[in-house]
Amino acid sequence: MKKSGIAFLIIVALWELLSASRLINPMFLPTPLETITEGGRLLVEKKILLDLACSLYRILLGVVLAFAVGVPVGIFIGYFSRFYDYVESALDFFRSIPPILVFPLSLLIFGIGEESRIAVIFFGCVLTMILNASMGVVNSQKIRVKVAKIMGATWLQILFRVVIYDALPQIFIGIRVALSMGVIVGIVTEMLVGTRHGLGSRVVYAQTAYATPEMYFTIIVVGLLGFLINNLLIVLERKTIHWKQYS
Amino acid sequence: MTGIHVGHVTKKMKLAPKRFETVFDDFSLDVGEGETLGIFGPNGCGKTTLFNMISGILNPDSGQICVHGKKPKERNIAYIFQDYRNSLFPWLTIRDNIIFPLKIKKMKQTEIDRKLQNLLDLVKITFDLSKYPYQLSGGQQQYVAILRGLISDPDVMLVDEPFSALDYSNSMWLMEKISRVQEKIKISSMLVAHDIEHLVYLADRIVFLSVKPARVVWEKTLEKVPGRARLRFDYDLLDEIKRVIKDIYVHDPDQSGLGEI
C-alpha cells in the first residue's frame, strides 16, 4: 500500500512538472491543482456524486443480474460436463463479441432508456460469470467429491456442500473480471447516446465544453471507482474464501 | 465372519479406447474381524483399484466382494486418502470436517454432539477443533481425515498411503496416533504404505502384491502384543522382511516391474 502511494505521488509530481513546463498546451493538460479545484466544485455542487450514483446503479444492476443468471448457469454447465461440451463453442463465440457492439441492437430492442445500457452490461458480464463458474466446477477437486460419495452424499449434497465451495475462488475471479468489464461497458454506453447523468456522459460534456480540468477529474473518479471496487472485492474474497491462499 | 472378503475378483481397466489392462485376475484376499491388513506392492499394482472396489466406487468385472457379509454399498466404509490436503474440506473447521459424514446423513445436532464427544473421549486430540485444516501440520490433517472416517462408526476402514505425503516427524507422529486409535477402536482395516516400517508398526498381517495382474506373493502374520500394539516395533522382524522385499522385488524383475539391475 505504501509503495502504491509512492507510485501515485510520483505520477502526480510528473504531471505537475509537465503541466508547469508548458510543453503541452494547458487546454489539453491542466495542472493537478486546477483539476482538484474543479473536482472540489463538482463535489460541492454534488454534480459528480449524482453522476457517480447513476453510473454505479447501472453497473451494479447489470453485474448483479449477470451474477444471478451466470453463476447458476455456469455451475450447471460445469457440473454436468457433457452439457459443457455442447455449449463450449457457443460460449466462446459470444465471448468474442465486444459487448459494446450489441449496444445499437439493445437500443433497438429496449429504447434509449436505462434498460438498453443495463442489458449491454449484462451481456458483457454474464459470459464471464458463466465461464468462470463452470471452470471452477470442472476443476474442483475430484477427490473431495469422491470422499463425499463414499460417505453416501446425494448429488445435491455434493453440489451444494462440496462442489460450489470448491468452485468459489474461480467464481470470485469471475465476479472481479465481470465488475471491471461492467465498469468499462457501463461508462462507454453513457458516452454514446441518450443519458444526461453518468460519469461517461460527463466526460463527453466536458470535452464538448473544453472543460479539461472537469474531464480529467471525471477520468480520475472512474479510475478510482474501478480501483475501489477491485480492492473491496479482494478484501471480501480474503474474508469469505479464507482457504484460497493455502490451497 | 470375515471383515472384508475379496473372492476370485477379476478387474480390467480401460487404458485407451479398446485397450484394456487386467489389474486383477482371480484375485482373493480376506481380512479378519478387527484385523489390520498391511498391503505392500509396487507402484501401479492395483492397490488403489482394490480399495475402490472394496469401497463400492468400482465394481469388479467378476468375483465377489463382501464387507461383513454384505455388498460394500450396504456397509459403512471409511476411506482415508493419501492426499489429505485435497480430501479435507478447507472451508470447514476441523470440528465440521470431522462431523461432515453425520451432517450428510442429516443426523440431529444433539446426536452429532454426542458422537463427537464419544470420539473425543476415546482418542486424544491436542489441537483446537475450531481451526481450519490449513492451520494444522500434515500429520494432524491426516489424523483429522482418519477421525472423520471413524465418527460414523464404520464397518471397515481403508487407509491408502497415509504417510507418503508426510515428512519423517509427521509420519512418526501419525503412526503413533493411528496405533493408539487401533488400541481403542477394533475395526477391520486395510492399510497401504510404501514404507515397510509403517506396516510392521501398525499391521497385524502384511501381504506383498505382485505387479499387474496383482496376486499375493508373500504374507506374514505379525505377533500380537495385547494392549501394547504400538510397541510392536521389532527390528529383527523388520530386517527379515526387508530381505524378503529384496528377494521378491529387487532380485525378481518380474515382480517389481523394474527390470534387471
Image: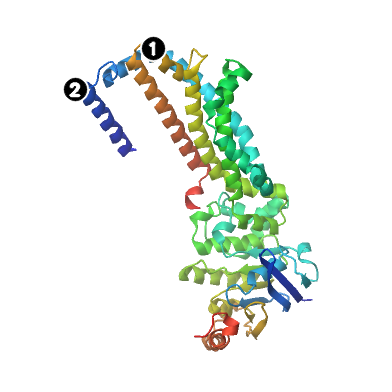
Q: Quadrant of the N terminus of chain B?
A: bottom right
Residue in view at x 73 percent, y 52 percent = B105
User: What crowding class fits label 2: few (fewer than 14 Cα within 10 Å), some (14-19), or many (20 or more)?
Assistant: few
Q: Secondary structure at mark 1?
A: helix
- In the image, what residue type sits under mark 2? Ser
Q: x%, y% of residue B191?
A: 62, 73
Q: Quadrant of residue B70?
A: bottom right
Q: Quadrant of residue B232?
A: bottom right
Residue A208 numbered mark, or none:
1
Q: Mark 2 and mark 1: span between their CA atoms?
A: 26 Å
In terms of depth relative to the viewer, which is nearer, B47 or A147? B47
The answer to whether residue B156 of the structure is visible from this angle is: no
Using the image, name the chain to which the residue with label 2 belongs.
A
In terms of depth relative to the viewer, which is nearer, B92 or B153? B92
Q: x%, y% of residue B83?
A: 56, 62
- Horizontal side of B52 relative to A219 (left or right) equals right
- In the image, what residue type sits under mark 1? Thr
Q: x%, y% of residue A191?
A: 46, 19
Residue in view at x 54 percent, y 44 percent = A170
Picture layout, residue A19 above or below residue B28: above
Q: Please name the residue that numbered disc 2 is placed on.
A: A21
User: What crowding class fits label 1: few (fewer than 14 Cα within 10 Å), some (14-19), or many (20 or more)?
Assistant: few
Q: x%, y% of residue B81?
A: 60, 64
- Horizontal side of A179 relative to B181 (left or right) equals left
Picture layout, residue A108 above or below residue A123: above
Disc on the earlier residue, 2 or 1: 2
Circle 2/circle 1 CB separation < 8 Å:
no
